[in-house]
Amino acid sequence: MSIKKTAWNFDNSYACLPEKMFSHLSPVPVRSPNVILFNHILAENLGLDFSNLSKTGVAALFSGNVLPVGAAPIAQAYAGHQYGHLTMLGDGRAIVLGEHITPDHQRVDIQLKGSGRTPYSRQGDGRAALSPMLREYVISEAMYALGIPTTRSLAVVATGEDVFRNTSQPGAILTRVASSHIRVGTFEYIATLENVEILKKMVNYTIDRHYLHLKEAENPALELLKAVIEKQIILITHWMRVGFIHGVMNTDNMTISGETIDYGPCAFMDAYDPKTVFSSIDRYGRYAFGNQPEIAQWNLTRFAETLLPLLHESQETAIQTVEDVLGNFPGTYQKHWLAMMRNKLGLFKQENEDEMLINDLLFWMQENKADYTNTFRALISKNFPTGKVFQDERFKLWHRRWQARLSQNACALESSFELMRANNPAVMPRNHKVEEALKAASEQGDLTLLNRLLELLSKPYEDFRSDDMSYQTPLDAGCVYKTFCGT
Ligand code: AMP
Ligand code: MG
């Protein structure tokens, strides 16, 4: 029996949309591609097998030097509100090779990021530096392992060419796998075209691709809006669960599928503080940890505005509908958030006092600079948590209240701990550990730390081995971690 290798199965539906939505073009070849990371498990899940290819063959493929059979490469057009201001954008350094259909009939975009200039590049060089592409690989895969909807990373290939980002750095291309790259910004772009036919086509396309159950809805655009709101609430609630700060929640970085996308200046919070911001360019804290739900609502309002022509023939009624639907956002989000926080504290059923119990813990954590990840994990024990921070009298008081609340659960304490273990990661990508691993990889070509980190992050809910304790230690509170754009 012969073994079928590679097995790309492209079906490129986006390229059948109106021409204004994209540009046909191929990746710009690179000098000497070299595979740095390859996600074998993801490749297998996608039904792809490259074992018949040499290392050079794989590098040629994931650098865009050779196109896979069936690819129809395009750069997508989109706009977006960046820090509140509408701009025309588009894939300035990315190319969707096509949509691969997996053996279990999932349709995924295969996108090369850093693949050269496109008609949407503006002043950019169309390229990406190695370290940020490795960073996207690490964090997106960590998010996946945490159970959070996200784009995935299949490969990072060094290009053998330098890119200039303040200093000269090695260049690289990331292969991103996404359920689609349709963004709020995609609809904002269509709104600038003032073309209702294209808008209708895009709504139908999105429903076919992501929300098939809405196909027969009386008002598909309205139902799509509601479904996207729900998906985004679920996503943001996950981010708040693990202390993830996206960092650039511009509308072009918000997907209609509800996947996390575009890992730029994102980072995870150590000490709990809703005002935490890592991105050096987010000077006013627009995208701070605690602002994320509100920003999601703001972005969804921009999405809703693009749909107005399809919501009702009377603009006034359409606006009223949007206001009603989005008016429910805070209440629905709060319900999701409370349910998530109950899980983090092992609370079954709902009691009136729960919200205060949760908020009192968060307030105490903020006052005492308690680590977000470690605090919840330390609570999973029959014994009082060890550690200096917990010796505080107010924490002891809170702990007694929590114990009393746990005793109201109908089930055994172990069930609470199980729920907590499943919702509170023990390991997440600590900023300084990620930086350390990226530095070794991009400056010395040493992948040892990076591979160890990837292995640990693939099982985030498992208890630590004692020799991995350094991954649990936050960065010294005195050192302020900053992330930079210019990736
Ligand atoms: P991002 O901040 O990654 O979401 O990117 C915002 C916009 O800038 C998108 O349109 C990107 O395609 C574009 N962009 C980012 N970096 C580059 C680059 N080096 N060359 C060309 N376009 C870029
Ligand atoms: Mg982006």
Image (spheres, rainbow, N blue to C red):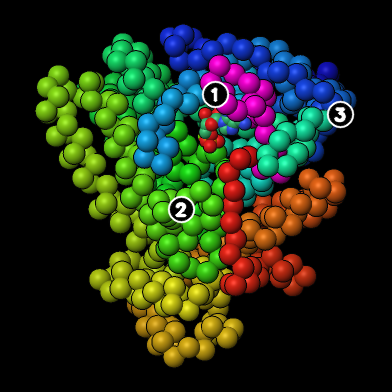
| First of labels 3, 1 by sequence position | 3
Q: Residue furthest front?
A: 166
In the drawing, what numbered circle is on residue 452?
Answer: none
- Position above or below: 318 against 447: above
- The picture places residue 410, in percent across and down from the top left corner, at 37, 73
Q: Amino acid at mark 1?
A: Arg
Residue 196 horizontal/vertical position (percent) = 28, 14
Measured in 3D between alpha carbons, the distance from the residue under mark 3 to the one under mark 1, in whole angstroms, is 34 Å
Choose top left, top right, bottom left or bottom right for residue 399: bottom left
Specify the quadrant that holds the N terminus.
top right
Residue at coordinates 32% horizontally, 44% vertically from top-left? 297
Residue topped by disc 2: 283
- In 3D space, how far apart are the residues under numbered discs 1 and 2 (Cα atoms)? 24 Å
On the question of residue 377 being in view, the answer is: no
Which secondary structure class fits the magenta region best? loop
Residue numbers of the magenta segment? 113-132
What whole-number distance in Å separates the C-alpha atoms at marks 3 and 2? 44 Å
Q: Which mark is residue 122?
A: 1
Give the labeled residue for mark 3.
55
**Residue 440 horizontal/vertical position (percent):** 80, 52
